[in-house]
Image (cartoon, rainbow, N blue to C red):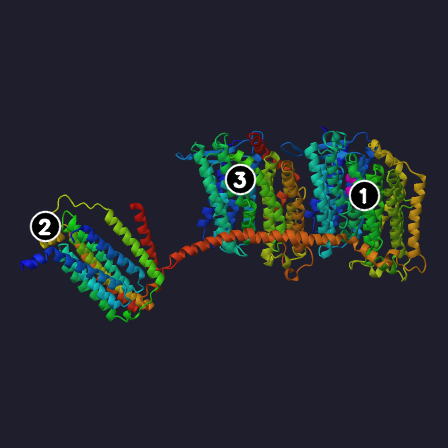
Amino acid sequence: MTSSWFQDPTLLAAMLGALLPFVSFVLIMVFTRPYPKLSATISVAAVSVSVICALFLLGRHWHLEHPIQYTTKWLVSGELYVPFGFMLDQLSLLMLTIVAVISFLVQVYSLGYMAGDPGFSRYYAFQSLFAWAMMTMSIAPTMLQFYIFWELVGLASYLLIGFYYEKFSASEAGKKAFVMTRVGDIAFFLGILLVLLNFGNLNILDMNSVDVTARMSPALITLCAILIFGGVAGKSAQFPLLTWLPDAMEGPTPVSALLHSATMVAAGVYMFARIFPFFSKSATAMTLFLAIGMITMLLASTMAMVTRDIKQVWAYSTISQLGFMVMGLAAGSYFAGVFHLTTHAGFKALLFLCSGVFIHAYETNDMYEIGRQGGRGLKIPMVCMTLGAAALSGLPPFSGFFSKEAIMGGLAGLHNPIWLWGGLLGAFLTAYYSFRLIFLILFPSKIKEPHHGEHGGHGHGDDHHHAGLYWVMAWPLIILATVTLVLGLFQTPLENFLVGHYGGAEGHGGGHHAWLLYVAVGLALSGVGLAWLEFGRKGASQVGFVERMEPVKTLFAERWYIDHFYRLFLDYVIYGIFSNLFTRNDRQVIDGGIDGICRATVGGGRMLSFLQSGMLQYNLMVMFAVLALVALYFFF
Amino acid sequence: MNSLTTYLFLAALLFSLGIFGVFQRRSLIGMLIAIELMLNGASINFMAFNRFLAPDPIVGQIYTLFIMGIAAAEAAIALSIIVAVFRRLGSINIERAQELRG
Amino acid sequence: MNSVQSLIQPQVLAQIGFAGIVALTLTGALIAVFPRNILYNILGLIVCLTGVAGIFVYLGSPFIALMELLIYVGAICISIIFAIMLSRPLHLSLPKRALPKVGLALGVGAAVFIMLSAIISRTEWQPAAMRSSDWSIATLGAYLLTRYNLVFEVISLVLLVAILGAIIIAGYARRSPS
Amino acid sequence: MEFANFPYLSTILFSCVVGLLVILVIPAERKMLIKWVSLVFSGIPMVLSIYLFFAYDKAQGGLQFVEKVLWVDSMGIYYFNAADGFNLPMLMLTGIVLFTGVLTMWELELRVKEFFAFTFLLVAGVFGVFMSMDLFFIFVWYDVSLFPMYPLIAIWGSTRKEYGAMKLTIYLLAGSALILPAILYLFVNSGLNTFDIVALMQPGVFTPFQQKFAFILLYLGFGILAGVWPFHTWSPVGHVAAPTSVSMIHAGVLMKLGAFGVLRVAIFLCPEGWQYWAQLMAVLATCGIVYGAFVGLAQTDLKYVIGYSSVSHMGIVGLGLATVTVDGLNGAVFQMFAHGVMTALLFSSVGYIYEKTHTKMIPELGGMSKIMPVASGYFILAALAGIGVPCLASFWAELLVFISAFKTYPVRGALAICALVVGALFMLRVVQRTFYGEKNEQFEHLPDLTFVPGIPRMILAAVIVLFGLFPSVMLDVIQVASVPFINGLP
């Protein structure tokens, strides 16, 4: 901490990596907005440096013994000291790498996807803002800094979701995302305030140490944990704040890939892992989180079974996988949760980017339509997407298989078997809806000739141009697909890397039960099989079993009416009652009161001026009467 | 007949009648007449004090003379005002003359 | 003669005369105030002023009594009558009485009267220690032209201004368009 | 430090007065000359106030740049100007807002001379209140700053301007009718025969009862100007009615005048009254925060929305003052500054849009981001600052206030924090309805903000971002005043 920043390569790398995207954001917003190419170059260059720095840090500190911390004064007020700095440990290094790599890939991919968009510069500015906020958040040393950048991440998400702001639905979705996560963030903020006031310190390492139990009562810890979890629920779209995420798909597809699948929504889970020891001090809270995770996972899976929108499927699956991660963490298997976070980041980004290619080519989000127009003609995305779906379903040997198994193992270690059954059901449903989508595109009921030239393009590029962009978009897919394939094999090194630190917290993460393995894979395969029966085989009706039951389908498609509830709540309680009531109060009671006073004054003046009526006789009468009375009073 | 208070009471009565007249008449001329009554009440007072109390019995008479002069001037002006008001308002009803109303 | 004189004492005669004059004054005053016809009021005023002149005689000043008759009855009342007679029908407009107003006026008048009489009756009237007995008109004239010279002049001026003012007001009002 | 004895504060103050006089002797037709003169005379205070802010010796602390001249001996009235950690941010804010306000009104054509003359009169009063350490002068300058609002709104305003101007004037004068008796009460009861605040604020000068009595009068009197709930209704109406730069000065600076008055007069002189009434202050402030946000949700006029957000944000200032802690005080002063700059930027952007489209009704606008991206960008930036997005100035202020409020008054603090959601909802709603969505064809041809008219907005935006990234620049100065003050409390 005493060494100056340029002498310490670690600090230098962390600073460069985390802060360069911000510089790029400012540069683009202030200077290069009219020059899209230059803006993109700046942004991609900045994020490339970030990737290099992140990989450098990861490599340099692969055998990290103690977390490294650098802080400097950001703000001092009275006894409150707010530092700004970096804290590097295994978890934050891993997250930093994930964020940097995925940001990089998405930015490269966007060069193709967003080409010719009028808001190209703006897009890259927001991407840089996001990268800065997310990376600084990942390596935050205190919960306050974490919160600050957490909010900034939310801001970037708001801006990117509402990127096509001319579309009402897009701006609406951005607003919804911001406000809904804000609700969670308020709980988060209250939670860290409670910790700050009772524990006196927000340093993450201190919060994770055993000191907490000494200074805070168990009930207080539970309360704080639940409040802070509110932030997780908001950001990671857990029940009951889950409905913003499907809407967030209004943003450009790379944004969905980056923020709403791989990185930002994982921030919630990351925070869970970040202060995992703190959370795990409250068994009550952990059980609650387990329940929330499971409910989220199952709800989202059911929603995914009936939607026709390709991005929506992945959005729901994201929610359900996030719920699954929360379950894993809440079950106490720290490594399993983080590992799934890592693998999920890879394959979900892959899935979204693949869908992006389809959407870009066919200008539709409807999977039936894509299939009908010959979606399987796009070879690379199709193969990559199938790989991703397999990973999502937990089929060996893809990365998802390993991480899911790890979580299942954690769930199996719990006393109450209901969690495990819930998890298994979720796995089955996941496999079913993933392959429903794959089969629908692979084996459409009526195949036309593939003709992506006709429909492709946003009306801006010719075929040749389009082909070039296609490859810009394809490369990230291939890289991600490779990652998906091989990441599972790195389970053991990663586990050593991560759990070396939190050794104590890891009780049963590795304890695989053999039967569980078979059951899980069997369920996943049967999910795939069911999907094949209904959608894949020749002459299949392509109507799912859920879709045959009209009321259930409606329920699922309407997202269990959660949104309706919020809408009604907003319309009737917030707007209808509070807003309206207060406005009326303002207009009528307060303003009316004051105006009333004013009017009374004016009226009083009028009344008095009535005395000044020009009726001389009355005036005189009063005068003499008063004179008489005064005289009588004084003389007697 | 020879006591001061008799005259004073008489003066007070005249004065009060004058006040009453001023208040209750609606016609400006009626009010003018009532004012003359009041002035006479005052004159009687002067004369009575002059007769019974004053060291120099000329002064009260002079005051009374002055009152008469003032009354004459007042009557002249009042009448002209009444005429003017009548021209303007078409009435000498005092209750119509409300242009000073607030 | 003597018996008549003894039968009707001068004091008694004076008393009767005084009572008559007071009655005349009050009657005149009432007539001046109450009736709604302006001419009756004027005539009442004349009667009342005549009574007042009589009272002045009783108060030992026949000169002022004459002046009263001359100025008030002879000048003021006549000018009012002229005003009524010569201008347009002022006397015809006979506004109705409003009872509340009369009541109020009566109340205020009574209050003023009560106040005045209370003051009169409760005051210890003390005559001046040294009283001159010079009532002659000559002295009065001398006073007017010596000690009250200025007031006399001012009164004259006021009268002049009042007459001019009256002419102007009445005349302007005639010419002004409204 | 060879200029140590240079009367910086008086120079700031009198550059406004001289500016006013110079404008008065320029013929009214020479509009450009008047504008340039205004620019110069508003630039001097800005530069000097920024210089003072950074030249203030934080290690030494206390009152600096003191100018003290006895004015009326028999009453103990001093011409006494000084700078400390509380008023330096305010002086800088006033300087910045004045300068940007003058630049914003560069296109004004209607009665230019009178407009700038009144503006300078207004700002001279504001500077006077901020820098004066003498009760008498504070009151005089305070009333000097109130009076020009009426003509400024009634002549150059819009939307129900007479009503707004009248309402504002009545409210503010009602406030000063509470202040004057309180000041006289304190003056008489001190027994020191002086209006010097430094002398009067010594402990033991006033009994607790006197402090409680005077405090509530002063709090309500100044509070009206600070938009304390439920005396806030003048402020949205006034904001709406006022012309752009007046709205900027009004919401940006004048409302702070009230809060600053509470701090400088009420809290400085009656610390025990402050502690006694803090509960009430917290309740009113929380009401204001929650209430302003909810009412803002239902507005359709852009300026009304900003007006109610001001009510909400000034509630945060009030809440900070009510906590009686260092953090709260720091947060309150910081929030005054941050909110001033932020609101000025909001009004400035709205002013531009209004100038071009001649409407500020939200339903009639829409898609403005497409038509004027730069102007919209400034508005969105300021709106985000208003929501409390981190790394923008007002976030830190809100953070400090909420931390201290949550510590002192958990329930009220939590309520106020929850109001942040509503605040976010209503600001975003406005942004969405106004700037996003289909663009209105009617306005398509309108030009965007170009570089030169953009300068004032640029300054304001830069201030917001800079103090958001480096909050300690501001807080270190405020700290110097607030820590000794709180430690010195009985």
Q: CA distance from mark 3 to mark 2?
A: 81 Å
Identify whether A479 is placed above or below A306. above
In the rendered image, is residue A53 in sight?
A: no
In front of the other: A24 or C134: C134
Image position, residue C141 (x, y; %): 11, 54
At mark 1, the secondary structure is helix
Q: Nearer the viewer, mark 3 or mark 2?
A: 2
| Residue plotted at (85% across, 57% down) | A367
**Which residue lies under the disc numbered 3?**
D262
Q: Amino acid at mark 1?
A: Ala
Q: Are marks 3 and 2 in contact (CB under 8 Å)?
A: no
Q: Chain of mark 1?
A: A
In the rendered image, is residue A1 in sight?
A: yes
Identify whether D238 is placed above or below A88. below
Q: Amino acid at mark 3?
A: Val
At mark 3, the secondary structure is helix
| Residue plotted at (27% across, 69% down) | C91
User: Do discs 3 and 1 belong to a common subunit?
Assistant: no
Q: CA distance from mark 1 to mark 2?
A: 126 Å
Q: Amino acid at mark 2?
A: Asp
Q: Which residues are magenta?
A: A266-273
Check disc 2: other Cα within 10 Å, few if <14, some if 14-19, many if 20+.
few
Check disc 1: other Cα within 10 Å, few if <14, some if 14-19, many if 20+.
some
Question: Is A40 positioned to the left or the right of C30 in the image?
Answer: right
In front of the other: A84 or A209: A209
Q: Is residue A50 magenta?
A: no
| Rendering quarter of residue D475 | top right
Q: Chain of mark 2?
A: C
Mark seen at residue A291:
1
Q: Are marks 3 and 1 in contact (CB under 8 Å)?
A: no
